[in-house]
Image: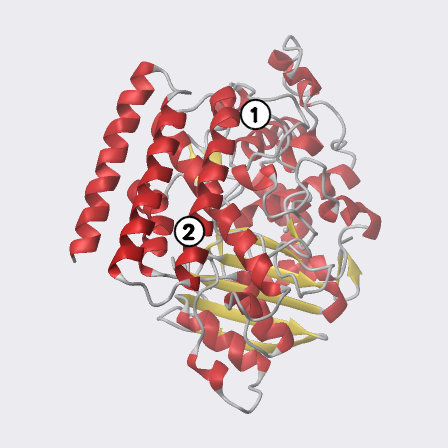
Amino acid sequence: MFAPRFPVHNVSRSGVFLALCIGVLVGCAGPSPASTQPPDDDSPAKADPFEMARSYAEAKAGDALLIWEDGELVVEDYTNGYRANDPHILASGTKTLTGLMALAAAEDGLLSLDEPVAASVPSWTEDPQKSQITIRQLLQLTSGLETRIGRAPSFQEALQTPLVHAPGESFRYGPTAFQVFGAVLAEKLDSESPEAYLTRRLLEPIGAQSPTWGRTDGDINLGSGARTTARNWLRFGRLLLGNGTFEGEVVVARDVLTPLTIPTEAGPGYGLSVWLNAPVDPAASFFEYAPRDVAPDGPEGMIYADGPNDLFMAAGLNNQRLFVIPSREMVVVRLGRRDRTWHDGEFLARLLNGEAYEGANEGASNRQGPQQRERAAAFVVRCQMATLDSTLSLTDAQTEAIRPIVQRRTEELFELRQRRASMEPLNRREKRRLGRALRRVMRETDAAIRSRLTSEQAAVYETFREEQRETLLRQRSE
């Protein structure tokens, strides 16, 4: 054994393209996802790691933090008005419930992970590519089905979703594949519903209550619809930590859970419904269709570069997190609300090492500086490509043609920012020179992108860019 993105379609269209440009002109730190430090980091005495983690979680719109270590609940903290018995949305953390349910169904002989979906969906047998999709590929998010973050489709809608690439070729995060699995499991179970099976097979044996569920046209949302308490989610995490055993009782056989943490070539930071702390190139195409708030932490480890290799997590929108760390005998539940400054590496550095996150300081060391710049550049490219796609509905061919253009532009902007830092303080002539260089980069980028668009897309792009220019002028005048 060795996990955003939500693709980034909810990013402000004007803010994404302009953030780095403004950074060049005024010397901001750029779009690094790790940019804040709590006040206790400057204390000369080493703080308690649990308290550092608790303070960070609370400050980042946290509702609950539970930490289980070495067989004991060592932290149980509820903040911002949240109470222990309040059900909380898990968002895409739900996917891991579904993944483990699939493994249990395989152990029970209801299905095989490598059987084709078409065995349960006759309408897929006539499609030469859909007929090749396996249940395993659904749960590894490499099925090739078109998907986007947002509303979960009904089972029938999911079954009618077209393919955008061959099965196994690429990783695409979203709800569609899990809803297809729901249709398959409902067929396999016959008279029992998927939610009833989950409760009977996995939750009741560990003393966890059944979640409440979001639905689409009556169909359970198996990708992001579960709501449950922090204590219930902790029990589920303890089952994962115990490799299928809970308080001495075998719920799922040990070897059955093995597929959970095996990555694929297309999804090197994702197993079967969980994110892995695997070594992943921050510029890998894998992140193009990963949720925004699962940001790469450098090539040594995707979740936290200085963390254990066996760390994995369930993750959901607004930073719902279930961290499982077998080598530390630890399970961590973090529930909260929207805060875009949350960063998994910052939280885990405090919890596991009792120290501030070094990656938050670009110049902290020779190792961290280049990693931080590489991570920031990859983050910018992903955001910009997601924004262009949501604005212009790019084809796959256009995406492949435009990505290198955006990559080059991002590299040039980072170079301009470095030049600006090396010339501090700037006189008026140097500011004008950098401003001209910035405008040149933007003009050349605009022309290159327009050349890859249809006439209709080019008109939309021109309107989009004009909105950005107006926003920049407004921000500079404030």
**Residue under circle 2?**
416
Quarter assignment of residue 207: bottom right
Residue at the far bottom in the pictured view: 45
Secondary structure of the residue carrying numbered label 2: helix
Front-most of 451 and 398? 451
Picture coordinates of residue 397 (x, y %)?
Answer: 51, 20
Give the residue at x 45% y 44%: 412
How many numbered discs? Answer: 2
Front-most of 117 and 419? 419
Q: Is residue 184 left or right of residue 430?
A: right
Q: Is residue 95 depicted above or below 56 in this figure?
A: above
Q: Quadrant of the C terminus?
A: bottom left
Secondary structure of the residue carrying numbered label 1: loop
Quarter assignment of residue 88: bottom left
Q: Is residue 45 left or right of residue 105?
A: left
Q: Is residue 25 depicted above or below 349 in this figure?
A: above
Q: Is residue 216 left or right of residue 135?
A: left
Q: Is residue 420 depicted above or below 9 in this figure?
A: below
Residue 292 seen: yes
**Residue under circle 1?**
145
Front-most of 424 and 71? 424
Give the residue at x 68% y 46%: 100
Q: CA distance from mark 1 to mark 2?
A: 40 Å
Residue 31 seen: no
